[in-house]
């Protein structure tokens, strides 16, 4: 059973500002920050299940997400357009707020 | 002297067994012993697997890059599926998908795994110790230009740096730009220019010095 991906390339998302215990693969430095979906990598086994031997759980959509350095670390005052890209599971992402 | 062993020895440096026996070392040994004792794997299979892993070198990745520089169709296949493209050259890139990210005149890619030390070792060989260091892993995302400068790589301001953090079950390698002045070089000569660091992104290939 595979869930269709909720996000599509070009969409803006925010990484959940969430600190669950246990094995997770979302680095702290991007939690709570906004990024852009580059591509859907596809359904992959959820490392948060695999780490505990739960191999019967459904795979989860994984995305390549791009972050601007300036968004991650505004205090660095980086004048350039440098970016960081990471591969993140869908349950770590939420739509970016549309209200201003 | 109880041993009667009285001739002098020079000072010894600590051997590999002289460090602390850590929790993870004990776990690794225990799991290995159990897999062997229960016949899940044999000692010979374990040795062959380690030999295969250790036989991978950056020369594999360098061949891939050199062929991609010479053959645009092959390059497209490298960018689509590096494992399959490596297979065309008779190189076993392993089961974990490897994605090549291409440098451009205005984009420079760098690879890291901030969580642990994920690395495309089937195409690049064993990761250098610095790649696994906390300093590299934490600093290259935050201050990539300063880190690259320490490697001797100074990028102009108009070149965007994109750091790839290998956080899932994919591995990344950099497909560097072919340096100017390498026209007429054959695949082997081009591959010799592509060092390990060029495929991590902490260096760029340089044309061979004039003889």
Image (tube, rainbow, N blue to C red):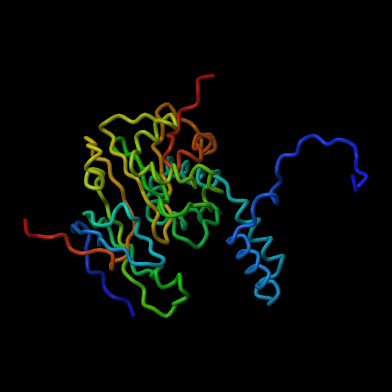
Give the total number of marks visible in the rendering. 0
Q: Residue furthest top?
A: B211
Observer-nearest residue: B190 or B120?
A: B120
Observer-nearest residue: A1 or A72?
A: A72
Residue in the image at 42% along x and 34% along y: B204
Q: Is residue B166 left or right of residue A91?
A: right
Whole-percent x, y for residue B103 in the image: 35, 41
Quarter holding the N terminus of chain B is top right
Residue in the image at 54% along x and 19% along y: B211
Observer-nearest residue: B162 or B173?
A: B162
Whole-percent x, y for residue B99 in the image: 40, 53
Observer-nearest residue: B61 or A54?
A: A54
Whole-percent x, y for residue A38 in the image: 26, 55
- Name which quarter of the figure residue B38 lies in: bottom right
Whole-percent x, y for residue B173 in the image: 43, 48
Q: Is residue B116 left or right of residue B1?
A: left
Q: Residue furthest left?
A: A100
Q: Is residue B182 left or right of residue B108?
A: right
Q: Is residue A38 left or right of residue B121?
A: left
Q: Residue furthest right?
A: B4
Residue in the image at 66% along x and 50% along y: B19
Question: In this rendering, is residue B191 above or below A10?
Answer: above
Question: In this rendering, is residue A51 above or below B16?
Answer: below
- Name which quarter of the figure residue A3 lies in: bottom left
- Name which quarter of the figure residue A36 lies in: bottom left
């Amino acid at each position: 059973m595979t869930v269709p991906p909720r996000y599509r390339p070009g969409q803006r998302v925010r990484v959940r500002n969430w600190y669950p215990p246990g094995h997770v693969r979302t680095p702290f430095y991007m939690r709570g920050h906004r990024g852009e979906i580059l591509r859907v990598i596809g359904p992959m086994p959820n490392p948060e299940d695999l780490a505990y031997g739960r191999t019967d759980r459904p795979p989860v959509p994984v995305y390549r997400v791009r972050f601007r350095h300036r968004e991650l670390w505004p205090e660095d005052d980086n004048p350039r357009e440098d970016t960081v890209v990471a591969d993140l599971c869908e349950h770590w992402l939420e739509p970016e707020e549309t209200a201003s | 002297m109880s041993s009667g062993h009285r001739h002098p020895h020079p000072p010894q440096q600590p051997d590999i067994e002289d460090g602390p026996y850590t929790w993870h070392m004990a776990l690794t040994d225990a799991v290995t012993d159990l897999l062997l004792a229960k016949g899940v794997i044999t000692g010979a299979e374990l040795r062959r697997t380690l030999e295969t892993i250790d036989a991978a070198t950056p020369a594999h990745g360098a061949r891939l890059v050199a062929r991609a520089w010479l053959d645009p169709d092959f390059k497209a296949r490298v960018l689509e599926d590096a494992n399959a493209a490596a297979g065309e050259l008779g190189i076993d890139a392993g089961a974990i998908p490897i994605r090549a990210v291409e440098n451009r005149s205005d984009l420079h890619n760098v690879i890291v795994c901030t969580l642990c030390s994920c690395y495309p070792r089937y195409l690049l060989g064993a990761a250098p110790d610095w790649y696994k260091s906390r300093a590299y892993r934490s600093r290259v995302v935050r201050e990539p230009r300063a880190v690259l400068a320490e490697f001797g790589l100074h990028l102009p301001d108009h070149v965007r740096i994109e750091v790839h953090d290998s956080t899932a079950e994919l591995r990344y390698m950099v497909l560097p730009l072919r340096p100017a002045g390498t026209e007429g070089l054959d695949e082997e000569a081009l591959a010799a220019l592509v060092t390990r660091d060029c495929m991590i992104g902490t260096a760029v290939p340089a044309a061979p010095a004039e003889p």
